[in-house]
């Protein structure tokens, strides 16, 4: 007889009918046994024995029925409940397994049908929402592209000085080992006093359009940055008493300050080197021209020779300092890199637009020059060369720079005419930009040359050029933001903080073995940050670690890390400090967290920092959501949640970390659905499942 074909109510009735019948049979058997002993000398003992036998039989029967109920009712209901929560709140798309509830009547098929309908509804809703939000997504991408190419670093901070937005340029300015992260204090990257003072000053002005210019320095390397701070405009949904956040734009002025210092040093040297010979020359000429000066003869000749020496020294000093000044001028002026072919094409287009013609030939070079001004200068020269023809612009490599040669058929240009052309404005209405000014900006000069066969040219050298390589594939510079952080109200105690308002660092380690007490060490640490309920893809920590000991072949077979791979890797002291900084202020999350935390905490004395972060374990969170009777390995958990771990990423620190983070994000809504909305509530609940970790770590 197939019990699965019977209705649930009938099966429950049969369970209890069998229990009642078993109890009656056990009781009757005990009475019969006692009745048979009724006339025996030990009749009372017979009844006692019969009662004990009946009692044991009843207890055994009840235990058997409980076991059947636990296996066929309680556990299946727990599994179905966990599966329903996962598909309702964690958006798992895999079909619900109804086989576990095959003895629960129509409950399992109803749950399967409900989850299938939920998946269909969610899919239809997702398609509708996706169609409606396509335009917004495109606009968002355009905005991110624009912000990523802003030539200054941009930070958006909340009133509590927590980072809400940063762009790629800000990462370059503040980056390295101290790259910025969402919901981290800006004071971790920039010294606090100038920022705090500027913010207080802007609040006092009560002018929404006010801005404050300031100088600040990075905490990592003391780089000097010019910054401008502006308060964010308050929206209508904000409380009037709420302090606003602010935008901070950053520009590196260390190079500008170094160039300014070099100019000042050059000027100081200039005055120092010409003051003495000028004074001596003035004294000697005064002696020579004085009425009571020496008469012609050896003494006067000696004074004249001394004056000539001082004049030559003065002239040499001025010439030397002028050359240094010209050499440094190009470094003071911000010149960009432009392809020689692009410069040639721009000149040809300009000449053709004015009714002329020119052939452009350029070597594969990158030129450091101001492209617009150089095009205007060359086009002006072509226009001035009236009566010439067959123009050719050739750009070739010359030493560490390049030679720009404008060639034509005809007579060479007289020096006087060329000087006049260079003094005239390049463009009508741009009197301040002449050919002479362009040459000065580039620390260059121009001269005519006569070639054979009735041709001539003008030569203009550029100081800096390099061979052009293939155009690299542009890598988009990310902008990272979460504007909801602006309005986050921070709880005083972590136990009262909602789960979705906490910052998490999900991490995993790979080790030389499983026994830290016997000398096993970490060989890799990887971590990702979760802020405001989403994983920040750009904020990743992933590094190999030199364990300072041999890596057993059995361990390499698991995680693929060999001794050769870690030979040049940093040790745990350096990596531990960097990881401690990365995880600062966050809740640590790991799968079987005690194992990983044991390795870290044993290294706290040498790292010089304690890992006092709150810790959550996805093993225990899985038990809370799916029940303690389920398997809670990472593979089993990700399978239940519909998360795929690529085979090549399994048992790598970063692969397991990303999988754990994705699983954790899917567990959070399921925890909230059970009423576990705060960190304290979750911790209290997971303590009930601590035995799992003891069993797991054996």
Image (spheres, rainbow, N blue to C red):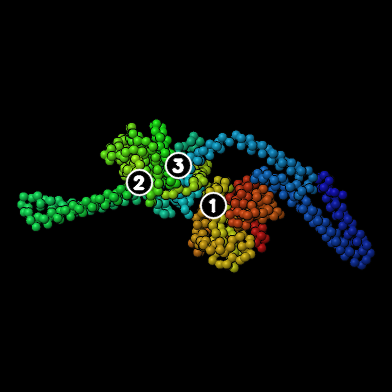
**Which sits in the foreground, 329 or 34?**
329
Mark sitting earlier along the chain (3/2): 3
**Which sits in the foreground, 293 or 410?**
410
Graded by Cα atoms within 10 Å as few (under 14), some (14 to 19) or many (20 or more), the crowding at tag 2 reads many
CA distance separating discs 2 and 1? 47 Å
- Dot 1 lies on which element? strand
Graded by Cα atoms within 10 Å as few (under 14), some (14 to 19) or many (20 or more), the crowding at tag 3 reads few
Indicate left or right for 393 with 184 as reference: left
Mark sitting earlier along the chain (2/1): 2
| Residue at image coords 90%, 64% | 43
User: Dot 2 corresponds to which residue?
Assistant: 461
User: Dot 1 corresponds to which residue?
Assistant: 540
Report the mark closest to the observer, 3 or 2. Answer: 2
Indicate left or right for 101 with 209 as reference: right
Which image quadrant is residue 523 in?
Answer: bottom right
User: Dot 3 corresponds to which residue?
Assistant: 150
């Amino acid at each position: 007889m197939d019990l699965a074909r019977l209705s649930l109510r009938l099966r429950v009735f049969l369970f209890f009918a069998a229990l009642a019948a078993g109890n009656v049979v056990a009781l009757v058997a005990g009475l019969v046994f006692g009745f048979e002993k009724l006339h025996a000398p030990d009749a009372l003992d017979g009844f006692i024995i019969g009662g004990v036998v009946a009692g044991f039989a009843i207890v055994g029967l009840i235990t058997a029925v409980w076991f059947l109920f636990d296996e066929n009712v309680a556990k299946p209901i727990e599994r179905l409940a966990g599966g329903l929560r996962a598909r309702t709140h964690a958006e798992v798309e895999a079909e619900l397994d109804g086989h576990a509830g095959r003895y629960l009547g129509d409950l399992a098929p109803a749950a399967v049908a409900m989850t299938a309908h939920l998946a269909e509804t969610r899919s239809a809703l997702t398609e509708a929402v996706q169609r409606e939000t396509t335009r917004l997504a495109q606009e968002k991408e355009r905005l991110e592209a624009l912000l990523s190419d802003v030539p200054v670093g941009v930070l958006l901070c909340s009133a509590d000085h927590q980072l809400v937005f940063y762009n790629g340029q800000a990462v370059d300015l503040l980056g390295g080992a101290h790259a910025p992260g969402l919901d981290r204090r800006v004071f971790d990257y920039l010294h606090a006093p100038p920022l705090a003072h500027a913010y207080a000053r802007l609040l006092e002005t009560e002018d929404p359009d006010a801005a404050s210019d300031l100088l600040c320095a990075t905490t990592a390397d003391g780089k000097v940055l010019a910054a401008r701070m502006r308060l964010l405009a308050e929206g209508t949904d904000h409380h009037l008493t709420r302090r606003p956040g602010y935008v901070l734009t950053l520009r590196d002025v260390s190079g500008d300050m170094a160039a300014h210092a070099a100019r000042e040093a050059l000027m100081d040297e200039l005055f120092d080197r010409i003051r003495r010979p000028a004074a001596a020359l003035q004294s000697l000429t005064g002696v020579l021209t004085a009425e009571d000066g020496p008469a012609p003869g050896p003494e006067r000749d000696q004074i004249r020779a001394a004056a000539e020496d001082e004049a030559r020294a003065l002239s040499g000093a001025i010439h030397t300092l002028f050359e240094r000044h010209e050499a440094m001028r190009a470094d003071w002026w911000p010149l960009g890199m432009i392809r020689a072919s692009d410069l040639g094409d721009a000149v040809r287009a300009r000449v053709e637009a004015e009714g002329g013609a020119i052939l452009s030939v350029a070597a594969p070079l990158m030129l450091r020059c101001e492209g617009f001004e150089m095009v205007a200068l060359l086009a002006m020269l072509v226009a001035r060369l009236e009566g010439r023809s067959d123009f050719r612009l050739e750009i070739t490599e010359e030493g560490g720079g390049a030679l720009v040669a404008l060639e034509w058929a005809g007579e060479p240009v007289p020096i006087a005419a060329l000087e006049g052309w260079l003094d005239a404005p390049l463009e009508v209405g741009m009197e301040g930009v002449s050919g002479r000014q362009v040459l000065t900006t580039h620390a260059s000069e121009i001269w005519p040359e006569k070639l054979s066969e009735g041709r001539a040219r003008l030569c203009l050298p550029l100081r800096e050029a390099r061979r052009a390589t293939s155009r690299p594939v542009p890598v988009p510079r990310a902008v990272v933001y979460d504007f909801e952080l602006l309005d986050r109200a921070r709880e005083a105690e972590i136990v009262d903080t909602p789960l979705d308002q906490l910052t998490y660092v999900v991490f995993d380690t790979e080790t030389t073995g499983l026994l830290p007490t016997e000398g096993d060490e970490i060989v890799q640490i990887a971590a990702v940050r979760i802020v405001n309920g989403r994983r920040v893809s750009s904020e990743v920590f992933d590094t190999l670690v030199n364990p300072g000991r041999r890596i057993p072949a059995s361990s390499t077979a698991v995680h693929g890390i060999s001794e050769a791979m870690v030979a040049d890797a940093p040790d745990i002291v350096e990596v531990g400090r960097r990881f401690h900084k990365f995880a600062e202020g966050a809740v640590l999350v790991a799968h079987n967290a005690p194992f990983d935390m044991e390795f870290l905490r044993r290294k706290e004395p040498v790292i010089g920092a304690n890992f006092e972060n709150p810790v959550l374990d996805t093993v225990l969170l899985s038990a809370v959501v799916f029940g303690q009777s389920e398997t809670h390995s990472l593979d089993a958990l990700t399978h239940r949640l519909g998360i795929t771990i690529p085979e090549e990423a399994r048992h790598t620190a970063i692969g397991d970390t990303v999988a754990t983070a994705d699983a954790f994000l899917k567990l959070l809504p399921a925890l909230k659905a059970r009423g576990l909305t705060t960190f304290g509530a979750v911790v209290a609940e997971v303590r009930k499942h601590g035995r799992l970790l003891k069993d797991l770590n054996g």
